[in-house]
Image (spheres, grey):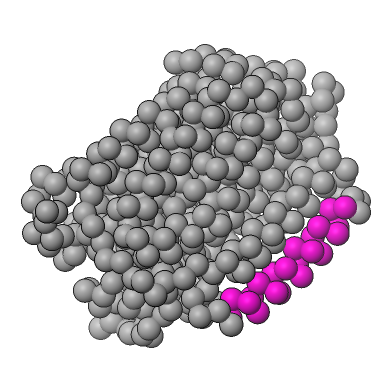
């Protein structure tokens, strides 16, 4: 019989943390690792940059919908069971992606892999519910560092498997093997968590969320293909705006909404959500554009004509810095040298500096490496701090909701960042069919401005946030108590 969570031996706790860190690393590999390989995917299947972007933005879009669904299922059946099931789905989809002979099959497999977005909220829930009474500062820092490790493995595979289709096929094979290993290990060491039979999945809200997001992303794609005057793009934007209004009305009336609008209005929650939305946008823009810049020919004035080895040198600093930032985040908070709020503010400054470096040092390997390193360090620092701040700011019994919403908004920021970038790049082209330098400048300036708004949101987070009851369960249901100020 499995031991009660409170009496789990230290060795088992460490093994469980390793499995959860591996799951977060797998999640990162399927996001940023694949983003690095977009030029190879584009060349292998002969598709446009705008179409290739759907390999990442479509994956993120499905993740936005999958995150609350996975959270609800975790409430219903226990987080351990659901996490293992998600790993099984990811493993099957990875095999299909590795064997894909057409862009359509690859895209479908990538959409299915979007369920991996639910791994991080499940991991946080398992840490808190499976091992009650334990500080989240250190473990959440480990999970944050795992994001950098996963992305780093994806980038290294570029160098190992070389250019072309072999690179992304090798990455998906690695992802499938890792998913199976984590699945078996999870069955052995992960703790059980409580089940809540009254939990329901908000089907209308999720359908509306997916429809709204799809309309907006498709609008950006149409603008990229047809220019700013696209009538189809305008109609899709109007449909998305109308859907947003309807979504808010539906969620306000839902007993167990996928996106709880009552939580979104609280200052500690909305500030954290804005930070995740904007930093997610910058993070994925960096992960997408750095390898695209490296792959472009030198004749464009900004490209490096990079092969697989040079792409690794340009992108690897991002993942090394992410691992460093994740471990540093946990140490700074555990040692009391910086509060989680201060770590979050520092990370947003790094996110703002990254696109500025890209804009000022375009066309140099050093500029690309420095820009990606700043993004990686910011990602690592933010991950652990965000998990702690969400836990502190959540009303009792609502941590699962707030973590899920925050993950949704991070993925939305990433998906829109990818599509906006490729839309802007598609509008103006230089000789040879490659984007003009001015297009990249516009993207980097816009990203810097948005990241600066992220700094403002981080500064707006109150110095004393709410403290939920330590023994309160994580639930994806309704909010039960208001935030209480700490002394």
Q: Position of residue 206 (x, y in %)?
A: 59, 64
| Residue 244 covered by magenta stretch | yes
Looking at the picture, tell me which residue is in the foreground, 462 or 422: 422
- Which residue is located at x 79 percent, y 64 percent? 239
| Snapshot quadrant of residue 367 | top right
Q: In the rendered view, does 27 fall on the left or right side of 124? A: right
Would you say the magenta stretch is mainly helix, strand or loop? helix
Q: Position of residue 283 (x, y in %)?
A: 53, 45
- Residue 9 lies, with reference to residue 480, above or below; the image says above
- Residue 270 lies, with reference to residue 25, above or below; the image says below
- Residue 281 lies, with reference to residue 482, above or below; the image says above
| Residue 82 covered by magenta stretch | no
The answer to whether residue 340 of the structure is visible from this angle is no
Q: Position of residue 467 (x, y in %)?
A: 29, 77
- Which residue is located at x 65 percent, y 51 percent? 416
Q: How many marks?
A: 0
Looking at the picture, tell me which residue is in the foreground, 181 or 164: 181
- Which residue is located at x 15 percent, y 60 percent? 5
- Which residue is located at x 78 percent, y 32 percent? 436
| Snapshot quadrant of residue 22 | top left
The C terminus: image quadrant? bottom left
Q: Position of residue 315 (x, y in %)?
A: 49, 29
The answer to whether residue 181 of the structure is visible from this angle is yes
| Snapshot quadrant of residue 129 | bottom left
Looking at the picture, tell me which residue is in the foreground, 136 or 291: 136
The magenta stretch spans which residues? 232-252
């Amino acid at each position: 019989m499995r031991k009660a969570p409170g009496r789990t031996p230290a060795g088992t706790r460490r093994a469980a943390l390793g499995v959860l860190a591996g799951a977060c690393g797998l999640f990162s590999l399927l996001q940023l690792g694949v983003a690095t390989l977009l030029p190879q995917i584009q060349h292998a299947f002969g598709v446009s940059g705008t179409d290739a972007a759907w390999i990442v933005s479509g994956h993120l879009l499905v993740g936005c919908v999958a995150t609350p669904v996975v959270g609800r299922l975790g409430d219903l059946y226990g987080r351990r069971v659901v996490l293992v099931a998600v790993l099984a789905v990811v493993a099957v989809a990875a095999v299909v992606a590795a064997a894909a002979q057409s862009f359509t099959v690859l895209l479908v497999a990538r959409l299915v892999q979007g369920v991996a977005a639910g791994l991080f909220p499940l991991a946080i829930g398992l840490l808190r519910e499976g091992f009650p009474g334990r500080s989240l500062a250190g473990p959440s820092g480990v999970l944050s560092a795992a994001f950098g490790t996963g992305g780093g493995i994806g980038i290294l595979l570029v160098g190992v498997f070389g250019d072309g289709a072999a690179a992304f096929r090798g990455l998906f094979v690695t992802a499938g093997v890792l998913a199976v290993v984590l699945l078996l290990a999870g069955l052995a060491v992960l703790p059980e968590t409580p089940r809540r039979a009254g939990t329901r999945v908000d089907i209308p809200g999720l359908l509306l969320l997916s429809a709204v997001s799809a309309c907006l992303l498709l609008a950006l794609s149409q603008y990229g293909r047809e220019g700013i005057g696209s009538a189809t793009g305008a109609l899709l934007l109007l449909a998305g705006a109308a859907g947003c209004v309807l979504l808010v009305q539906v969620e306000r009336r839902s007993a167990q909404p996928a996106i709880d609008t009552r939580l979104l209005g609280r200052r500690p929650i909305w500030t954290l959500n804005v930070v995740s939305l904007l930093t997610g946008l910058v993070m994925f823009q960096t992960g997408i554009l750095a390898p695209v810049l490296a792959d472009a020919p030198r004749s464009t004035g900004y490209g490096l004509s990079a092969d697989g080895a040079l792409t690794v040198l340009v992108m690897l600093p991002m993942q090394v810095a992410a691992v460093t930032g994740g471990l540093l985040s946990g140490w700074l908070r555990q040692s009391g040298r910086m509060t989680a709020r201060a770590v979050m503010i520092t990370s947003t400054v790094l996110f703002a500096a990254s696109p500025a470096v890209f804009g000022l040092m375009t066309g140099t390997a050093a500029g690309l490496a420095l820009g990606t390193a700043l993004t990686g360090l910011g990602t690592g620092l933010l991950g652990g701090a965000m998990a702690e701040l969400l836990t502190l700011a959540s009303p009792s019994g609502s941590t699962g909701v707030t973590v899920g919403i925050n993950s949704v908004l991070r993925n939305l920021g990433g998906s829109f960042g990818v599509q906006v970038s490729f839309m802007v790049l598609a509008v103006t082209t230089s000789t040879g069919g490659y984007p003009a330098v001015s297009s990249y400048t516009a993207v980097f300036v816009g990203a810097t401005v948005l990241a600066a708004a992220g700094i403002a949101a981080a500064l707006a987070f109150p110095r004393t946030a709410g403290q939920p009851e330590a023994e309160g369960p994580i639930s994806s249901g309704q909010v039960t108590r208001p935030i209480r100020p700490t002394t």
